[in-house]
Amino acid sequence: MLLQFKFKNHKCFYDEAILDLTATQEKGHNDTLIDINRNEILPIIEINGANASGKSSVLEALYFMITTIKMSSKFDISKDLITNPFAFDNTSKNKNSEYEISILIDGYEYRYGFSMNKKEFEEEWLYKKKFDNVKKYAQKIIFERNKNKVEFGSSYTKYKKTWELFVSNIELKKSLILSIVSIKEPDGILRDIYEYINNINFKIENIFKQQISIQILNQNSSLYNKFQNIIREFDPCLYGIKVEKSSEDPEDKSYKLSGIHKNVDDNSKNFLIPLENESAGTIKMFNILPEVLKNLEQGGLLCIDELDTKLHPLLFKRIVDLYKDRETNKNNAQLIYTAHSTFLFDSDELRRDELYLVEKDLSGRSNLYSLSEFRNLRSDADYRKKYLTGQLGAIPYNNKR
């Protein structure tokens, strides 16, 4: 599970930004929290704010970190590293960008991160400690790296041998220890951390891949039935979505997608409507719902940009409620999403620590903060009213004047 993600000097974020999924001490919706040995973790984070404030950049920063880890073992050492520093001044491009993720695996918190510029990975670190909010445990070093100097903890010397065996001093600058060692050592905690990070899924608006939904539905009949049931909930005229191969040719990998509609004159027959002719909301549901259901079934983290776009507010709420319900979220799945809608910006729906805002100032710098940082904001307050009247910030500037 994800406990925390923080980053610095990325796109519109100049200062450090922190997304924390460990629950605060506030009361409310405690029955929706994920309980791990007396430690409570949030299943949901909503990120809201004005257009162009930097909401999507929070997800993109996490995506950038994950992609960098995946691609580290394949970088061309003759070329500069791909970076995405703060864009609105003359100096940030020459400074390091930093990314750090804290995850929970088998009762231990692993804190992994790196700092980088276009020439090298300057620092990289991985620490381990027993996860317990009641009793504090000391942090142990798995490895620390500063430029070409790498130190491994006493219990992890086998990783040092693997690293030194496969990496020259030149390659070291443009390779991540986590990536290289986890590939060469298929067993062990570094591989577990790499696999968790590698399995974080993203859904970015306008880049949805229907092929993923097709694959999920074809491979899991139980999940396919759940998908059809939810589809029927929001459109009484839509009986389901039919997924079938375009032809009998085994070489043809394409599929035909159709909405199944009842024939009002003959209940024994149905009409098939090509999916592209269905509503934008139906198409979006086909693109995201199978992955939501798979995430709930398997656990892990799913990130969706603009979850609310093209969906009725009640359907938007229906998806979020799947993560809040411990019956439908038995495997501790987590959802982080961005939204413009304030429909769930309500103490009856989400906790203060589950609601984040992004505000961009006049210098182009974005700031990420949680409602739990407002000490005078009661947990039963009208969040929506306070937000829309500008009391919480993060609204378009023309409404502030």
Image (cartoon, grey):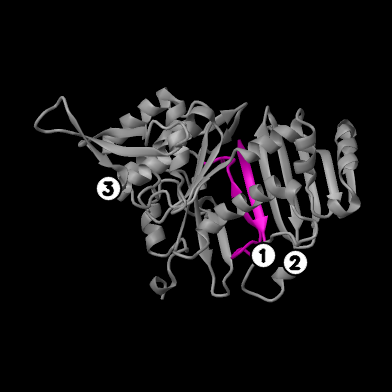
- Mark 3 residue crowding within 10 angstroms, few (<14) / some (14–19) / many (20+): few
Is 380 included in the stretch rendered in magenta? no
Identify which amino acid the numbered label 3 is placed on.
Asn
- Residue beneath label 3, please? 277
Number of labels in the image equals 3
Q: Give the range drawn in magenta.
A: 1-26
SS for tag 3?
A: helix
Alpha carbon separation for disc pair 2 and 1: 8 Å
Q: Is residue 25 magenta?
A: yes
How far across and down, in percent of the image, does residue 206 sit? 44, 54
The reply to whether callout 2 and callout 1 are in contact (CB within 8 Å) is yes
Q: Which of marks 3 and 1 is in front?
A: 3
Q: Residue 85 carries which label?
A: 1
- Give the number of the disc on residue 93: none
Residue 282 coordinates in the image, percent (x, y):
31, 44
Residue 123's spot in the image, x, y percent? Answer: 81, 53
